[in-house]
């Protein structure tokens, strides 16, 4: 199994990644062995994950989410389908 995960950094930044072991990866981030983006933003906290059967599928989803604006990522995390739909359609207004 592969996972796509989203972390919230201490400064509020959300970070998206993929791995086969989410718990191990979160520990690595918190011990400055994760992505460079998180190293100066510790600690990080896991706030979302999805499961995929293959690495390819997980990495495709990770790439998709990384292109999204922050508001859409937060809508995904909170399972807010109407906001997700509105942002996807280009009609989202803050």
Image (cartoon, helix red, strand yellow):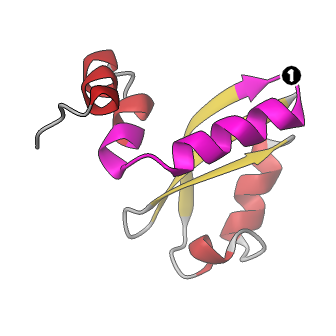
**Which span is picked out in magenta?**
51-73
Number of numbered discs on residues = 1
Residue at far top of view: 81
| Most frequent secondary structure within the magenta stretch | helix
- In the image, taking residue 79 as reference, residue 91 lies left or right, namely left
Tell me where residue 40 appears, x and y as whole percent: 55, 82
Tell me where residue 13 appears, x and y as whole percent: 42, 63
User: Looking at the image, which is closer to me, 55 or 2?
Assistant: 55
Tell me where residue 81 appears, x and y as whole percent: 34, 17
Magenta region includes residue 80: no
- In the image, taking residue 26 as reference, residue 24 lies left or right, namely right
- In the image, taking residue 86 as reference, residue 5 lies left or right, namely right
Residue at far left of view: 94
Tell me where residue 78 appears, x and y as whole percent: 37, 28
Neighbour tally class for label 1: few under 14, some 14-19, many 20 plus, Cα within 10 Å? few
7 vs 1: above or below: below
Q: Taking the image as drawn, is residue 93 in sight?
A: yes
Give the residue drawn at x 70%, y 70%: 35
- Tell me the element at label 1: loop
Give the residue drawn at x 66%, y 35%: 61
Q: Taking the image as drawn, is residue 46 in sight?
A: no
71 vs 39: above or below: above
User: Looking at the image, which is closer to me, 55 or 44?
Assistant: 55
Give the residue drawn at x 78%, y 73%: 33
Quadrant that contains the C terminus: top left
Image quadrant in which you'd find residue 84? top left
Q: Mark 1 points at which residue?
A: 53
Give the residue drawn at x 78%, y 24%: 52
Quadrant that contains the N terminus: top right
- In the image, taking residue 27 as reference, residue 86 lies left or right, namely left
46 vs 37: above or below: above
């Amino acid at each position: 199994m592969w996972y796509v995960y989203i972390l919230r950094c201490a400064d509020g930044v959300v970070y998206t990644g993929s791995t086969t072991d989410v718990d191990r990866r979160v520990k690595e981030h918190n011990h400055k062995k994760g992505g460079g983006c998180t190293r100066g933003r510790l600690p990080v906290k896991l706030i979302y994950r999805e499961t995929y059967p293959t690495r390819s599928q997980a990495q495709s989803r990770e790439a998709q989410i990384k292109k999204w604006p922050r508001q859409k990522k937060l809508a995904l995390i909170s399972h807010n389908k109407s906001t997700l739909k509105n942002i996807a359609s280009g009609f989202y207004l803050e």
